[in-house]
Amino acid sequence: MLKLRDYSITKKLTWMNMLVSGAALLLACAAFVVYELTTFRAAMLRNLSTQAQIVGANSVSALLFHDPQAAENTLSALRAAPAILFGGVYAKDGRPLAMYWRDRGGPALPLPAIPAGQMETHWFTDQELILVRSILFQDKLTGMVYIRSDLREMTNRLTRYASIVAGVFLVSLFAALLVSSIFRRIAAQPIVRLAEIARIVSREKKYSVRAPATGNRDEIAVLIDAFNEMLAQIQARDGALETARVELEERVQQRTAELEAMNKELEAFTYSVAHDLRAPLRHIQGFSDALVEDYGPRLDAAGKGILQEIADSTQFMGRLIGDLLALAHVGRQEPQLQLAGLHSLAQEVLRDLKHETDGRNIEWRVGGLPFVDCDPGLMKQVFYNLLSNAAKYTRPRNPAIIEIGSTSVNGRGAIFVRDNGVGFNMKYSDKLFGVFQRLHRREDFEGTGVGLATVQRIIHKHGGQIWAEAEIEKGATFFFTLETLETKAPQEETRTFALKGEHG
């Protein structure tokens, strides 16, 4: 059921006009009826009091000489007043002398008492007006007149008033309805049209429409003009925003093309430099080996130490060049997707890591990993980099615990690699996947700082994300998602095996 506040403005104005008009009419009619009733009651009382005075004046001799017949003749004049029901003349001691009944005969009615000090008294009942008046002769109480009159005339007048009030009320409401329709066209219709335009603008975002002007100079005209001006400003700003958006898209496309070209040039340069550095690096390594072989016995300890530093540096440079070439290769290579089991890829990596973990006490925990659409070669490189990192940073632990498994993060499937190694400070986690960024000293843990950058690039090419959680001396966990990874990766029983010198 609709409430009044939910009605349209036209209905509200109509109801308001009808209610105000009806209330004003009812109040006016009520005041008129009350005034007429009060006036009519006063007139009835005056008329009845006058008749009582006339009867009393004409009944003095009948009271003095105790002549009931004369008193009855006087009372018979009341027949001229059809409203009078009963009239009686009473002696001063209250004994009835003569009576008059309009419709019937009957015994004399008991005489009501008159309050001391008053000539007459009266009161209204539901159906009658009752009056008692003293009869004086030479300022002495001679008798009393008792008259009862019905209120039929007043009831008839009330009925006529009610009919008149109902007629006037209905005619006035009809006139108010006509006036409301005229007022609605003048005042409410522009507001209704303005509301419809506002709905169109809100629903269709069509700022070119305008509310029609009224041609008036009232507040509604000011509101319509202000609304149209606001639409014009929004339309102008919307056009400017659209122009700016188009220009921004063009700039973004241009900058993206430039950035892609620069990245390709940088990757080509990196690949070229790294590839060209291999030949002189091999020469340095070869001449260092020849120097040690041919002139080693002639060198003292300091000279041998210098040659060893050269050999170590060339080996590090060789690894760095290899990592840079791998990073550049990943940048140029598009993934060749096919269905592959991540579990088997992880097992292959563990076999490849055998020579790096010989003699260590490592507890591997390999959980159930799903089948996904991926580039098996690139995904194997991801596992190799993550697992070799875990093996490297758990070197101080005995036993080292490295776990591989699948989980759900925010409703999306993810793969994780967890270790109990030295961990790192999450304050510097934003540097974790940058090229040449290291969170530990090279003297403590070897590495080129390129491996995790390569992992991130591979994961991004697969439409996924990679991140890490860690705490110093409490290990680290690397998570990554793939676009083809199910929302919840299948879970299998985790297989645990220890590695001491060789894989079990």
Image (tube, rainbow, N blue to C red):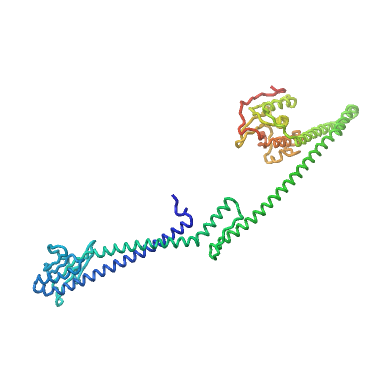
Of 312 and 341, nearer the camera is 341
Q: Which residue is drawn at 30% across and 67% down?
A: 36
Q: Residue furthest bottom?
A: 138
Of 252 and 369, nearer the camera is 252
Placement of 409 over or under 238, stated as above or below: above
- Residue 110 is left or right of residue 157, and the answer is left
Q: Position of residue 326 (x, y in %)?
A: 77, 34
Of 403 and 46, nearer the camera is 46
Placement of 363 over or under 219, stated as above or below: above
The answer to which quarter of the image holds residue 320 is top right
- Residue 396 is left or right of residue 30, and the answer is right
Of 395 and 143, nearer the camera is 143
Q: How many labels does the image show?
A: 0
Q: Position of residue 30 (x, y in %)?
A: 34, 64
Q: Residue at x 69, y 24 (%)?
A: 499
Q: Position of residue 41 (x, y in %)?
A: 26, 67
Q: Residue at x 18, y 73 (%)?
A: 53
Quadrant of the drawing holding the C terminus: top right
- The answer to whether residue 87 shows anywhere in this view is yes
- The answer to whether residue 442 shows anywhere in this view is no
Q: Where is residue 88 in the image (x, y as percent from the top left)?
A: 15, 67
The answer to which quarter of the image holds residue 85 is bottom left
The answer to which quarter of the image holds residue 312 is top right
